[in-house]
Image: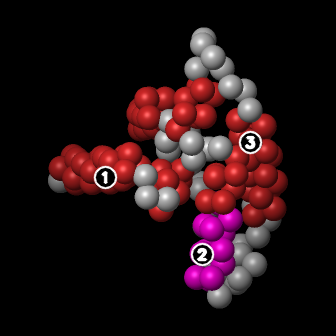
Amino acid sequence: MAKFAAFFSGLLFGIGLLVSGMADPLKVIGFLDIAGAWDPSLVLVMGGAVLAGLGAFHLAGRRTVTYLGLPLRLPVARQIDRRLVLGSLVFGIGWGLVGLCPGPALVDLGAGQWQAAVFVAAMLLGMGLFEWLQRCVNR
């Protein structure tokens, strides 16, 4: 049942990204271009996502298990540190340059867009590089 719930949640998320326009890099870049031809339509999408997330985290904070009976593991870190700031900067720069972040990139990859394949390959390479650097630093 947990695998079905994960599949259904991912499918629903992907459909939401497509319907909202978040999987369209040109629409995202238009949203991010506040000094040019700004497209504010994604403000409602992001606002709705934030509200839904706030409600979900509020409800989840009162539970120790999911509705499927699995352990509920919420993030516990509260501090803003150098890793968080640098990671956010890299994420934001990549999002601004390409108009994709990991979720929409996977949706576009599933739709057969070659640009998404390049993005996902670069993303996986970056993740691998980060892990390798972490192991080198922690030796």
* Local SS, label 3: helix
Q: Which of marks 1 and 3 is nearer the N terminus?
A: 3
Task: Classify 23 as above or below 35.
Answer: below
Residue 104 located left or right of residue 136: right
Q: How are the colours assigned in the image?
A: secondary structure
For the residue pair 77 and 133, the one nearer the viewer reads as: 133
Residue occupying image coordinates x 60% and y 11%: 35
For the residue pair 6 and 18, the one nearer the viewer reads as: 18
Residue 120 percent location from the top left of the image: 37, 52
| Distance from Cα at disc 3 to Cα at disc 2 | 22 Å
* Local SS, label 1: helix
Check disc 1 and report the residue beneath it.
Answer: 121
Q: Is residue 84 magenta?
A: no
Instruction: Tell me which segment is drawn in magenta.
Output: 2-13
Residue occupying image coordinates x 70% and y 51%: 19
* Local SS, label 2: helix
Residue 133 located left or right of residue 49: left
Q: Can residue 134 be seen in this view?
A: no
Residue type highlighted by circle 3: Val
Residue type highlighted by circle 2: Phe
Label at residue 129: none
Check disc 3 and report the residue beneath it.
Answer: 45
Q: Can residue 125 be seen in this view?
A: yes
Check disc 2 and report the residue beneath it.
Answer: 7
Q: Is residue 4 magenta?
A: yes
| Distance from Cα at disc 2 to Cα at disc 1 | 23 Å
How packed mark 2 is, by other alpha carbons closer than 10 Å (few <14, some 14-19, many 20 or more), is few
Residue type highlighted by circle 1: Ala
Residue occupying image coordinates x 66% and y 78%: 5
